[in-house]
Image (cartoon, rainbow, N blue to C red):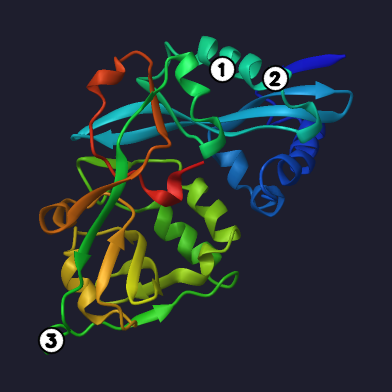
Amino acid sequence: MLQLVKNYKQNSDIRKAFFEFTPKALWGINFKPWAEKGYWDSLSYDGYALMKDDKMMANVSFTKMKILIDDQERTLLQLGTVGTLEEERGKGYSRLLLEEVLKDWEKRVDWIFLFANENVLSFYPKFGFEQFNEGIYTFPLPKPDSITSFSFKKVCFPEQEQWFWDKVQNRQPVSSRFAPRDGHEIMMLYIYLGYGEHVWYEEKKDSVVMMEEKEGTLHLYDWIFSGQHNNLYSLLKDIPFEAKDCIVYFMDDNVKKIGSYKNQSHMFFIRSGKEEKESFPREIVFPILYKT
């Protein structure tokens, strides 16, 4: 017989079932190493699940997040880890769980959002979700000059993991338009999923830049600093790559002035909470390393 369980992250037996569930239902993702480091415990990330004995059949997770939007701190709920074991699909399990989450949370947060996969784009509008623009910024990289001289060093994991985590926790928002104020543990999950290979540090500006070069293009995933807001464009004059163009996967106020916005995703869905979904800002770049 199926049992609905809510807010299970402190239940060790159901956590174990979750760790066994996600690689099967969600493209092989393994949350266990990240959780064992304590990042799950400090994050407001929890879930609702359908259990059969000690086995998880379906799951919907959520993260309550503070996000700076147009200079105001707002409260949002991000849904993620929505999945059902393959042999149990088609039985309405995700619908049941989603209805429970929305019933419990819609009056407690300003908006509810998620990033859907391509196979279920018609599913979420049934629950009041609407597709919103979400994209990237692109611009040509500046040429090196003799005035600036920055030196990037690779950050090594796991040796420098605590150092990096301290930087992340004390980061300043890179944009007044749209920037997470918490939920940094999500970024640490991406570190465990392979993004630790792309972390660089520039000492003069005390900046951590997460980036990699692919076929002549710099992919800029995040920029972390704790002091005064620096000019990202000038910092990129001495990157350790031969790239000519740049794609930015987060909002930055300076980049917004020089870059071109491109709507990249039709998978970003917003639903009203305490605020109407029509009042949510258009044409944002949701930081890629804060998506669940």
| Camera sees residue 129 | yes
Q: Residue at x 67, y 50 (%)?
A: 29
Q: Is residue 247 above or below residue 8?
A: below
Report x, y in % for residue 111. 37, 22
Residue density around tag 3, few if under 14, some if 14–19, many if 20 or more, within 10 Å: few
Name the amino acid type tagged 1.
Answer: Val
Give the quadrant of residue 76.
top left
Alpha carbon distance from label 1 to label 3: 53 Å
Whether residue 56 sits left or right of residue 155 in the image: it is right
Q: Is residue 153 above or below residue 212?
A: below
Report x, y in % for residue 40. 61, 42
Q: For this rendering, which residue is in front, 160 or 89? A: 89
Of the two numbered discs 3 and 2 in the rendering, the one whose residue sits closer to the viewer: 2
Secondary structure found at label 3:
loop
Q: Is residue 104 above or below residue 54?
A: above
Whether residue 144 sits left or right of residue 127 in the image: it is left
Q: Residue at x 41, y 55 (%)?
A: 168
Residue at the far bottom: name it. Answer: 146
Whether residue 212 sits left or right of residue 68 in the image: it is right
Secondary structure found at label 2:
helix
Query: Dot 2 corresponds to which residue?
Result: 93
Looking at marks 1 and 3 on the same chain, the residue that comes earlier in the sequence is marked by 1
Marks 3 and 2 close (CB-CB < 8 Å): no
Q: For this rendering, which residue is in front, 69 or 98? A: 98
Q: For this rendering, which residue is in front, 17 or 215? A: 215
